[in-house]
């Protein structure tokens, strides 16, 4: 799973959100490191809907424009959980190796 997909699913795990709210939440949870463009987001939302990982929660008209809210499906929740576990395992391995490196080299880094 690529990072933007992971972040979009993470944003939707909290509550249903419309597109711009997803963009804002992704920026917030990454400390501004990731700023999704609207075109990237909406292409990803369409793909995720097609894969059954998200669905439309509701639609409303705001200032004469359609605002569509998306939510995570059960399949999306499972996929996000699996990806979170995979990333956690990889981070644990990296941390273990860094600790071993510090021990092997007496605390010095090369």
Image (cartoon, grey):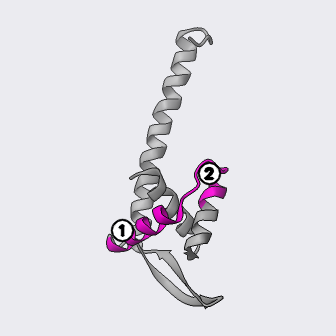
Q: Nearest the camera: 78 or 26?
A: 26
Tell me where residue 79 appears, x and y as whole percent: 39, 61
Secondary element under disc 2, as helix, strand or loop, is: loop
Residue 75 part of the magenta segment:
no
Splitting the image into 4 quarters, where does residue 62 fall? bottom right
Q: Nearest the camera: 90 or 61?
A: 61
Q: Which residues are magenta?
A: 26-50
Q: Main secondary structure of the magenta part?
A: helix
Tell me where residue 90 appears, x and y as whole percent: 44, 38
Mark number for residue 47?
1
Secondary element under disc 1, as helix, strand or loop, is: helix
The residue beneath circle 2 is 30
Residue 31 part of the magenta segment:
yes
Tell me where residue 86 appears, x and y as whole percent: 41, 47
Q: Nearer the viewer, mark 2 or mark 1?
A: 1
Q: Residue furthest left?
A: 51
Q: Residue at x 47, y 51 (%)?
A: 3
In the rendered structure, which disc, 2 or 1, sits on the residue that comes first in sequence?
2
Q: Residue at x 53, y 30 (%)?
A: 95
Q: Is residue 97 above or below residue 14?
A: above
Q: Is residue 66 above or below residue 6?
A: below
| Disc 2 from disc 1: Cα separation | 22 Å
Q: Is residue 39 above or below residue 95?
A: below
Tell me where residue 99 appears, x and y as whole percent: 55, 23
Q: Nearest the camera: 70 or 63?
A: 63
Q: Residue at x 41, y 51 (%)?
A: 2
Q: Residue at x 59, y 64 (%)?
A: 23
Q: How many marks?
A: 2
Q: Residues within 10 Å of mark 2 (few under 14, many from 20)?
A: few
């Amino acid at each position: 799973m690529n990072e933007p997909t992971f972040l979009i699913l993470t944003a939707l795990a909290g509550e249903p959100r419309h597109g711009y709210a997803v963009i804002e939440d992704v920026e917030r949870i990454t400390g501004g490191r990731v700023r999704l463009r609207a075109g990237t987001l909406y292409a990803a939302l369409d793909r995720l809907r097609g894969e059954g990982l998200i669905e439309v929660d509701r639609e409303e008209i705001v200032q004469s424009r359609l605002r569509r809210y998306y939510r995570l499906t059960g399949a999306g929740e499972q996929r996000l959980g699996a990806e979170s576990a995979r990333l956690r395992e990889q981070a644990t391995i990296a941390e273990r190796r860094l600790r071993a490196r510090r021990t092997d080299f007496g605390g010095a880094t090369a």
